[in-house]
Amino acid sequence: MENLDGTVLATALPAMAADLHEDPIALKLALTSYLLALAVFIPMSGWAADKFGARKVFRAAIVVFTLGSILCGLSSSLETVVASRVVQGMGGAMMAPVGRLVILRTAPRAELVRALAWLTIPALIGPLIGPPVGGFIATYFHWRYIFWINVPMGALGVLLTSRFIPDLRETDVSPLDIRGAALTGVGLSCLVFGFSVAGRGAVPPLAWTSLILIGFAALFAYVRYACNAPFPILDLGLLKVPTFRAAVLGGFLFRIGIGALPFLLPLLFQAGFHLSAFQSGSLTFIAAAGAMAMKTAAQPILHAFGFRRVLIVNALISSVFLTANIFFTVETPHWIVMAVLLVGGFIRSLEFTALNAVGYAEIDQRILSRATSFASVGQQLSQSVGVAIGAAALEASRAMRGGGELAASDFAPAFMVVALISAASIFAFRPLAANAGDELAGRNSRSDYGEVSVRSG
């Protein structure tokens, strides 16, 4: 529900703009307002789950997200759409981190990789199937149904949560770090918004550059503060854990390339090859099949080769498939395009599953909530950075050609840049021990690191 919503909405923005009598560029605020809410509230998700219980918070998050969807569907102006999307973002910020926390605390370690494999699928297929779904709804129904279809799904989610999710909570919960929440909220929201609009022409360069600088300054201030804070909202001490550090830093670089793909690929097919939105979505949809196929293959692959080897080799292979998009032309048979995207979807899904699992291999149960919040912040920021870098590379390529309409040749440098950044993740994976995460992979040995408990401060 959450992963589909944003990409479905992006496709329907022109129809929304016409109905609300607004400029389509102004409607982009409906997307960025949601991202801002995520940036502010994700750091609080772990604390909220510990304080009030994972089941209660997860159920409340679904209710808030569904309420935001209803308000979006009833909106009659840009202002009400933006405000309603903020409400949605408040709910969405809690769903993914708390859902991951529930799996980490309840799934047997021998089954954790398989459980997390299911968790990666929505994040991968949402950006791919969202455009054709959004185009279909906007064309044959009405854009308001994009939000209203969340109502029955939300109701079902509440019922299933009440039935199946245990009431997990901590007995000794630290107070909420108000100062840390303020600093991270300002820093992350400025960075996410700045990167979201960078190079797109909607905001003057001075404005988005200033936002990015303010964001970095606020996060730098948070780092200095967190070093001596007794209960920091984002525990930097977690980076002392080798597997978690590799998953966060390496995952950040890897996700930059993957985050740019849902932006670049539909644009290549539509602006470069002049396909319709539905034709474009029909091609990219095949990557979802690759992601689904991976869910049963991840555990055997990790068991055979181990996390370190899979993360390094698979990141390089994934970068090769990102680069392969350069060679698509308007004459390329669609079955070749779909074959490349199918295998690419499988490979990316495998990397995500490995990253999500190994990052928690040596994390003590008592600090899992802090780890999920920290990791979720990195994932959210990397996607915004990926789109910004892809857009900047695309704009630079067009400018070097002399400007004008986007051409298929403009996309080659953009794909190459994000592929190289994604490949650079191997430098974060290389320091991992050869047997890192072996217990999770079922390789019958414990990691050299053991289980690590991080004490705040």
Image (cartoon, grey):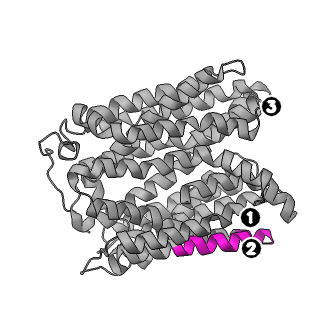
Foreground: disc 2 or disc 3: 2
The secondary structure that most of the magenta stretch takes on is helix
| Front in this rendered view, residue 292 or 305 | 292
Work out whether mark 2 precedes mark 3 in sequence or the reverse, and give the earlier one. Answer: 2
In the displayed structure, would residue 382 be above or below residue 305? below
In the displayed structure, would residue 422 be above or below residue 92? above
Question: Please, what secondary structure does the residue beneath circle 1 have?
Answer: loop
Whole-percent x, y for residue 301 in the image: 29, 33
- 3 and 1 marks in contact (CB < 8 Å): no
Residue type, mark 1 in image: Arg
- 2 and 1 marks in contact (CB < 8 Å): yes
In the displayed structure, would residue 181 be above or below residue 106? below
Q: Which residue is mark 1?
A: 144
* Residue at 63%, 26% in the rendered image: 412
Q: Which residue is mark 3?
A: 403
Q: Magenta segment range?
A: 63-81
Badge 3: residue crowd in 10 Å (few <14, some 14–19, many ≥20): few
Whole-percent x, y for residue 81 in the image: 72, 69
- Dividing the picture into quadrants, the one containing residue 424 is top left
Foreground: disc 3 or disc 1: 1
Residue type, mark 2 in image: Leu
Question: Please, what secondary structure does the residue beneath circle 3 have?
Answer: loop
Residue 257 is one of the magenta-drawn residues: no
- Residue 343 shows up from this direction: yes
Separation of disc 2 and disc 1 at Cα? 8 Å
Location of the C terminus (image quadrant): bottom left
Separation of disc 2 and disc 3 at Cα? 40 Å
Q: Which residue is mark 2?
A: 74
Residue type, mark 3 in image: Gly
- Residue 11 shows up from this direction: no
| Front in this rendered view, residue 384 or 157 | 157
